[in-house]
Amino acid sequence: MDNQPFRTDMISVSDVSKRYGGHTALAPVTLEFAQGQIVALCGGNGAGKSTLIKMIAGMIPPSTGEVTIDGIGWRRHRTAYAKKIGYMPDDFQFPGGVTVREWLGFYAALRHVHPEWIDEMLGKVGLQEHAHKLCTSLSKGMRQRLMLAQAAVAKPAVLLLDEPTNGLDLHWISWFVAMMKEFRQSGQTIVFSTHQLEVATELADELIYIHDGKLLKTFICKQADRQHMQEEIQDLLFAAAMPSA
């Protein structure tokens, strides 16, 4: 990526929406995220955060609109598009009988990653000593770290992380924040969803609040007072939780 020109539109989401029958999971949104930008998606359960991440990742097709990454459209160039992405789903279920290293090694082979980088990545996520354990025997936090390793192992231009800090204790949350800042320094664009406002406001350059399938507000974190921003988001969450009249 170092030899590529800087892109202000590394991720371009143009009038993208998602409907399931008569239900609107996400109303039309238009967004652009720059190379090296970190974006946090916040909102309650069922707000539409995961739906947006899955559409950017190419996991589900949008009902309307188009997504491009580094100028590549998902609909016409799916293989090239997929190579740009590292995707971490929420609460992935590992198959039985597969060790940590086998799992990461299999995925790394699909992305033509040098074997040495597998061990380096296991070390980065604190799983080197657990490399021969079965994936299904790992704690929630360890599974999260393994899925993050899978998303990041090929050094993709874009990381799409769905609730990556779920199950992490305070030590590993601090580690996650530091690791994401390191990835940003290398020019990677990161979009992640979270319920943890402290993580979002500390890490993100831009915070997007989504409720009931609608983008309600965008905060530019570098320009905002973080304490005031957290209070405003808490007010939005409280208002969203109140029953409508």
Image: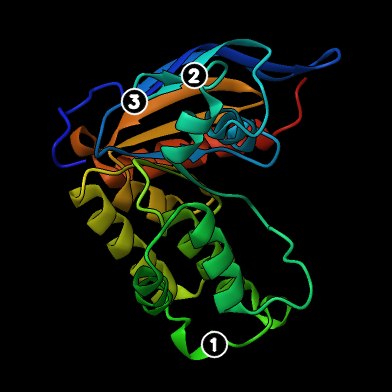
* Mark 1 crowd level (few <14, some 14–19, many ≥20, 10 Å Cα): some
SS of the residue under disc 1: helix
Question: Which quarter shows the N terminus?
Answer: top left
Which amino acid, mark 2?
Val
Which amino acid, mark 3?
Asp
Q: CA distance from mark 2 to mark 1?
A: 38 Å
Which amino acid, mark 1?
His
* Mark 2 crowd level (few <14, some 14–19, many ≥20, 10 Å Cα): many
User: Closer to us: mark 2 or mark 3?
Assistant: 3
Instruction: Work out whether residue 177 or residue 126 is closer to the camera in this orientation and state it.
Output: 126
Q: Please tell me whether residue 129 is drawn above or below residue 41 in the rendered image.
A: below
Q: Residue 97: image x %, image y %?
A: 77, 78
Asked if disc 1 and disc 3 are in contact, CB closer than 8 Å, the reply is: no
Q: Residue sitting at 79 percent across and 74 percent down?
A: 96
Q: Which residue is mark 1?
A: 130
Question: Which quarter shows the C terminus?
Answer: top right
Q: CA distance from mark 1 to mark 3?
A: 36 Å
Q: Residue sitting at 72 percent across and 66 percent down?
A: 94
Instruction: Work out whether residue 17 or residue 215 is closer to the camera in this orientation and state it.
Output: 17
Q: Please tell me whether residue 99 is drawn above or below residue 8 in the rendered image.
A: below
Judged left or right of residue 129, residue 21 is: right
Q: Residue sitting at 61 percent across and 50 percent down?
A: 89
Judged left or right of residue 136, residue 173 is: left
Q: Which residue is mark 3?
A: 70
